[in-house]
Amino acid sequence: MRNSSRGAVDPFIVMDVMEAARQAEDAGRHIIHMEVGQPGTPAPAFARQALQSAMTDNPLGYTVALGLPALRERIARLYGEWYNVDLDPARVVVTPGSSGGFILAFSALFDAGDRIALGAPGYPSYRQIMKSLDLTPVEVQTRAEARYQLEPSDLNGVDYQGMMVASPANPTGTMLGKDALGALIAAAQDKGAAFLSDEIYHGIEYEHKAVTALQISDDVCVINSFSKYFSMTGWRVGWLVLPPENVRQVERLAQNMFICAPHAAQVAALAAMDAGEELEANMAVYQENRRLMIEGLPKAGFDRIAPPDGAFYVYADVSHLTEDSRSFARAILDEAGVAVTPGLDFDPVRGGGTLRFSYARATEDILEGLDRLARFMRTHGHIT
């Protein structure tokens, strides 16, 4: 049977690394997972208990396409609690993970052939989803001096109908302050372009609170998810916040594309939002893991790093060690038993000289991983 040209997207390399790590584990090896941005903790106990209760007396059938009203209302309330933003729940759309949110937003806001500006390095699935929808990702190389975040000057002379920004960012963990984010929003709006803000790592911040685009403008599309801060990756539930005039467009698409986000996941997500004590305990682990990584990676020979502002990643420049990050990451997996992600996933131009390390797992895993990395680098003569 024939294949479409739209389906000819690149693989998500970190998923390939995960599969290689799984095969090594099946062969009896103990692998330290620093490749995937997945919390080592389950969904909050309160969320799991709520779902268990619901399963006894709720058929968990279809919900309306926009999501459970109680969940939409609770998400809207979160913006008041976290950012002092008064958000109308009618602007919230519950989605099948942030990935479902990207598909809905890209489909609702853009026509085939439209160009969306992205900073590189960045989350690889942006560009692959765009390509599958006949959109054109315009990847703009960002500067290390700007901590790999887009600046308005990067876009001079660039033709685009949309701009996509993530703060905290994947793979770098860097954040945009209110002025910097506002300048990008203004640049997009001055051009008549849609502005999309990926805020999936909000809640996982260290010295400063992340800024939501909704603190600056109502004429933006915000994408978020329960995967990271709420520790619910596999539950596949996220949300969009849209201007009022875009909600019905997204609703019609959601009805036809997905019917609804998983009902069971929505029940759990609603309860997870009130599991603050457990979620903050997870944050204490990330805080300690971040400290260990910032101290331990340079000692292990990965000394070209910048402390992340949020999320749970460290992006390392290894261009003095290799220009083939994929082979380098494979050697680390095979010899050290540590799975890390090649930078090619995030930046096809410069990613051959970078690696991403995730510190989302248990602290004892981070300690063991750093020790293994140091031994690998010592064996190869990169440190003494």
Image (cartoon, grey):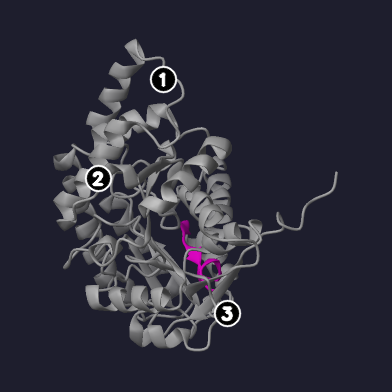
* Residue occupied by mark 2: 76
- First in residue order: circle 1 vs circle 2: 1
Give the residue type at disc 2: Ala
Q: How far apart in space, not on screen, are marks 1 and 2 (Cα)? A: 23 Å
- First in residue order: circle 3 vs circle 1: 1
Q: How far apart in space, not on screen, are marks 3 and 1 (Cα)? A: 46 Å
> Tags 1 and 2 in contact by the CB under 8 Å rule?
no
Give the residue type at disc 3: Val
> Tags 3 and 2 in contact by the CB under 8 Å rule?
no
Q: Give the range drawn in magenta.
A: 337-347
Decide if residue 296 is on the left or right side of residue 32.
left
- In terms of secondary structure, where does tag 2 sit? helix
* Residue occupied by mark 3: 349
Give the residue type at disc 1: Leu
Q: Quadrant of residue 265?
A: top left
Which residue corresponds to the image point at 21% horizontal and 51% vertical from the top-left? 79
Depth order, front residue of 367/82: 82
Q: Does the magenta stretch include residue 38?
A: no
- First in residue order: circle 3 vs circle 2: 2
- In terms of secondary structure, where does tag 3 sit? loop
Residue 40 visible within the image: no
* Residue occupied by mark 1: 60
